[in-house]
Image: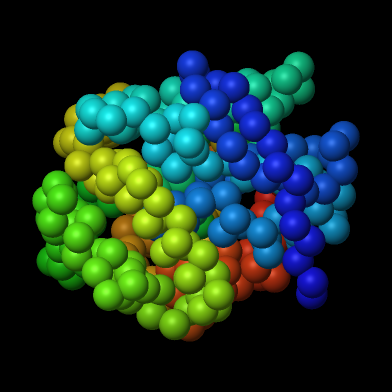
């Protein structure tokens, strides 16, 4: 299908200005989409267009560090409590008087979304996580599964200030490009690399990794809102151990959807299947 360009939006939330795009009828039920690394709001275009065809209003916002109007300099400003507070304020700004919204997150966006769904269930009508397991399930896997620890070995490199930026952007972003492993269209990868090469953007995005802490899961309880978790069997970052344990940390209606032979980049790689699962969760709950 031809993917229509989203309408530009700008949202004031948590003392910052967040840029983004939206698709679908302005009075449609709102689905807030949270992107991951190294992408931004545009990564949701194909999926959002399909949700719009189903009558939903899909809003994708560039998160902290990715929006020009929300790019603090200190690593500490990218700690999980700040990322969660941003999304809470986004929900309140985008939803207006509606109250709870349907929330979807991929990669880092899902990591934050799990926290929001667990800590602020009154704001989340339904939750769909894409690729990233529940953080408590991840903690279990990292403690017991050597394979999962190996999958996360790249994070040590990302924490090296300056060296990581240089390595990822060298040779026309060859380091960044390698993460996609051919699963995303070349023109989309080109656009992502160009975005990350803008002054300050890649450092801000890497600060999400540099600010992580063992304390991030303190106080996180099982999710009590209707939840779907969509995971690709060939995901390079998140293995089966954490994926299959995620349901242990959801007490509401839950569905685990495994996409065979799909990788980590599901919004780009499998927008049709993903749209079906999101619509089923949103419209069936």
Residue found at x 59% / y 55%: 42
Q: Does residue 137 appear to the left or right of 34 in the view shown?
A: left
Query: Which x, y percent locates residue 58?
Result: 72, 46
Q: In which quarter of the image is the N terminus?
A: bottom right
Query: Which x, y percent locates residue 68?
Result: 48, 36
In front of the other: 17 or 260 = 17
In front of the other: 278 or 178 = 178
Q: Does residue 116 appear to the left or right of 169 in the view shown?
A: right
Residue found at x 56% / y 59%: 43
Q: Does residue 172 appear to the left or right of 117 in the view shown?
A: left
Question: Is residue 33 in sight in this rendering?
Answer: yes
Question: Is residue 233 in sight in this rendering?
Answer: no
Q: Quadrant of the C terminus?
A: top right
Residue found at x 69% / y 37%: 9
Q: In this view, does 260 lie above or below 105?
A: below
Quadrant assignment, res 141: bottom left
Query: Which x, y percent locates residue 190?
Result: 48, 71
Q: How is the image coloured?
A: rainbow
In front of the other: 186 or 222 = 186
Quadrant assignment, res 38: bottom left
Q: Is residue 75 above or below residue 56?
A: above
Residue sitting at the far front: 199
Total marks drawn?
A: 0
Q: In this view, does 233 lie above or below 113?
A: below
Q: Is residue 283 above or below residue 258?
A: above
Query: Which x, y percent locates residue 107?
Result: 42, 54
Residue found at x 28% / y 64%: 169
């Amino acid at each position: 299908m031809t993917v229509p360009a989203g309408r530009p939006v700008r949202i004031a939330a948590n003392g910052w200005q967040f840029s983004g795009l939206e698709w679908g009828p302005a009075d449609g039920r709102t689905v807030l989409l949270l992107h991951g690394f190294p992408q931004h709001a545009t990564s949701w275009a194909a999926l959002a267009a399909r949700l719009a065809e189903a009558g939903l209003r899909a809003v994708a916002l560039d998160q902290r560090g990715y929006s020009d109007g929300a790019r603090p300099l200190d690593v500490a400003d990218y700690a999980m409590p700040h990322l969660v507070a941003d999304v809470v304020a986004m929900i309140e700004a985008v939803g207006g008087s509606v109250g709870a919204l349907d929330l979807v997150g991929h990669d880092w966006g899902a990591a934050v979304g799990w926290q929001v769904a667990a800590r602020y269930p009154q704001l989340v009508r339904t939750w769909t996580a894409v690729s990233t397991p529940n953080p408590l399930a991840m903690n279990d896997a990292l403690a017991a599964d050597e394979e999962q620890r190996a999958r996360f070995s790249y994070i040590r490199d990302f924490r090296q200030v300056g060296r990581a930026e240089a390595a990822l952007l060298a040779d026309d972003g060859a380091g960044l490009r390698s993460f996609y492993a051919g699963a995303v269209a070349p023109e989309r990868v080109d656009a992502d690399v160009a975005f990350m090469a803008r002054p300050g953007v890649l450092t801000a995005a890497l600060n999400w990794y540099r600010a992580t802490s063992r304390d991030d899961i303190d106080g996180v309880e099982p999710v009590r809102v209707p939840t779907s978790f969509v995971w690709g069997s060939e995901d390079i970052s998140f293995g089966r151990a954490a994926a299959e344990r995620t349901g242990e940390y959801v007490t509401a209606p839950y569905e685990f959807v495994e996409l065979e032979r799909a990788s980590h980049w599901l919004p780009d790689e499998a927008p049709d299947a993903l749209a079906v699962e999101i619509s089923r969760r949103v419209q069936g709950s």
